[in-house]
Amino acid sequence: MKKDEVISNKKILKDFNEAKELLKDLKNNVTIFGSARTKDIDKYAILAKKLSKKLAKNNINIITGGGSGIMGAANKGAFSTKKVESIGLNITLPKEQTPNPYTSKSMTFTYFFSRKYMLVKYSKAIVVFPGGFGTLDELFEVLTLVQTGKLNGIKIYLIGYDYWKHLIKFFEKSLCENNMIQKKDLEIMTLTNDIKLIEKEILKLIK
């Protein structure tokens, strides 16, 4: 095995082992995905903060990618309660990904694939706010894992009806009508703007 391969393998194992150690004793976790680019006054950042705070008050830990924007807002909401763990699973990027200061537990990954897996492995639900390619990548990863039975018993919520409705239409008109997925696969996701509904369903799921 070449030296570069040995180094890569060690970094991969480090990603997984450190994340497992960080998260292994935590129960009742919810992961929140969303853009790193949104401002604090953005309506979706405000909703992310409100939702995470509501969940945290019910002893639910919040996991994010550890960056700014939606992620920072979600961590801030959980962190402000001082009741639960506010977790950031970060990754170093050349432009926008810097750790937010609202985490009680955090680590920085080397690889995207290990980070994506650990972001959802210990969670009971995934809440996806508007975001770019990174958020879409995370969403499709979870959809694939749930559809193929590799990740069971997890709920996926999309917040932002106007933002996501065209993607859902694409699923219906292109994927379903061309038999690329089954119509029941769309039931994996719930599209809503109602954070009270999400809170209620997650509390039922966890309790």
Image: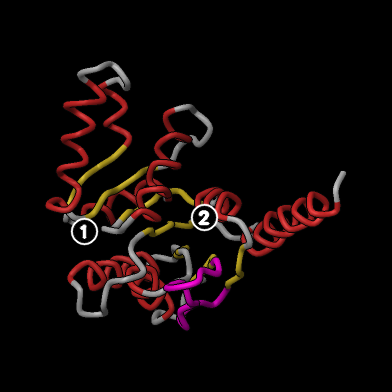
Question: Which type of secondary structure does the marked residue at label 2 adopt?
Answer: helix
Three-letter amino acid code at the position of disc 1:
Lys
> Residue 101 in magenta?
yes
First to last magenta residue range: 91-105
Amino acid type of the residue that numbered disc 2 sits on in the rendered structure: Leu
- The residue labelled by disc 1 is 196
Q: Is residue 80 magenta?
A: no
Nearer to the camera, 64 or 177: 177
Above or below residue 141? Residue 53 is below
How packed is label 2: few (under 14 Cα within 10 Å), some, or many (20 or more)? many
Residue 83 against residue 157 in the figure, above or below:
below
Q: Which of 37 and 192 is in front in this view?
A: 37
Residue at x-position 61% and y-position 70%: 107
Residue lying farthest left?
A: 162
Q: Residue at x 52, y 55 (%)?
A: 119
**44 relative position to 156: left or right:** left
Residue closest to the far top: 179
Q: Residue at x 32, y 54 (%)?
A: 128
Q: What element carries label 1?
A: helix
| Residue 103 % position (x, y) | 50, 77
Q: Can residue 53 be seen in this view?
A: no
The answer to which of 183 and 110 lies nearer the viewer is: 110
Residue 119's disc is 2
14 relative to 132 in the view: left or right: right
Whether residue 64 is visible, yes or no, is: yes
At which x and y percent is residue 192? 18, 49
- The image quadrant of residue 45 is bottom left
When the figure is inspected, residue 41 is found, relative to residue 198, above or below; the finding is: below
Give coordinates of residue 83: x percent, y percent. Answer: 46, 76
The Cα atoms of the two marked residues, 2 and 1, are separated by 23 Å
